Amino acid sequence: MENLEKIRYLILDVDGTMTDGGVYLDSRGAEMKKFSIKDGAGILLARRAGIESVILTGRESQCVRKRAEELAIPLVFQGVKDKRAFLLEFLETNEILPQEAAYMGDDLNDLEAMQCVGLAVCPQDAAKQVKAYCPIVLSARGGEGAVREFVEMILEKRGIQYEGLAL
């Protein structure tokens, strides 16, 4: 839990973390995703507390691009097949120490990336192997406030009254 005070970057997987993991298709085949407003508010709270959010996902989706725009997240990386290699390069290029980054993911393709950062965290409904690895398993499920729960945990550990932070 002492690692929470050092976090400056929150690396977020999308499907199963920022969403419920479902991929919805309309009658024309257009993809839709359900994002939690609570998680969006958590990302805004994190930014106001000096924590930058980074989206790192293996899939490409216009929905993700749109949600990132709504939340003013400039660091969005889609279609990343080797998250570990990408994350190692990202940390080095941006001179980010591993202990300054937390990674939130839910499935097996997140495990190696989780090993590159100071803190790994997952939603309640993450794969059992991910839950076994993460020192913090949240009570919320992916896409249902897990990101917000983690941000509040960080802010509480730092003694920041997030109730007073304007969204």
Image: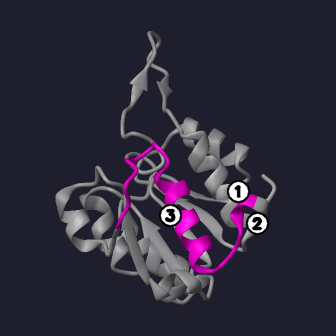
* Residue 63 at x, y percent in the picture: 56, 36
Graded by Cα atoms within 10 Å as few (under 14), some (14 to 19) or many (20 or more), the crowding at tag 3 reads many
For discs 1 and 3, the disc positioned in front in the rendered view: 3
| Residue 83 placement, left or right of 163 | left
Residue 48: give its label: 2
Q: Amino acid at mark 1?
A: Leu
Q: Which residue is situated farthest in the right direction here?
A: 166
Q: CA distance from mark 2 to mark 1?
A: 6 Å
Residue 154 shown in magenta: yes
Q: Which mark is residue 44?
A: 1
Q: Are the residues flagged by discs 2 and 1 in contact, CB closer than 8 Å?
A: yes
Identify whether 114 is placed above or below 77. below
Q: Position of residue 55 (x, y in %)?
A: 54, 58
Question: In the rendered image, which residue does mark 3 sit on?
Answer: 150
Q: For the point 49% across and 32% down, which residue is it?
A: 33
Q: Position of residue 103 (x, y in %)?
A: 44, 69
- Position above or below: 39 against 33: below
- In this rendering, the answer to whether 120 lies above or below 66 is below
Q: Secondary structure at mark 3?
A: helix
**Residue 32 sits inside the magenta stretch:** no
Counting every numbered tag in the picture gives 3
- Residue 69 horizontal/vertical position (percent): 71, 46
- Residue depicted at x 40% and y 53%: 58
How many neighbours does mark 2 have within 10 angstroms: few (below 14), some (14-19), or many (20 or more)? some
Disc 2 residue type (three-letter): Arg
Q: In front here: 126 or 112?
A: 126
Measured in 3D between alpha carbons, the distance from the residue under mark 2 to the one under mark 3, in whole angstroms, is: 15 Å
Give the image quarter of residue 74. bottom right
Image quadrant holding the N terminus, namely bottom left
Of label 1 and label 3, which has the lower sequence position? 1
Does residue 141 appear to the left or right of 75 in the view shown?
A: left
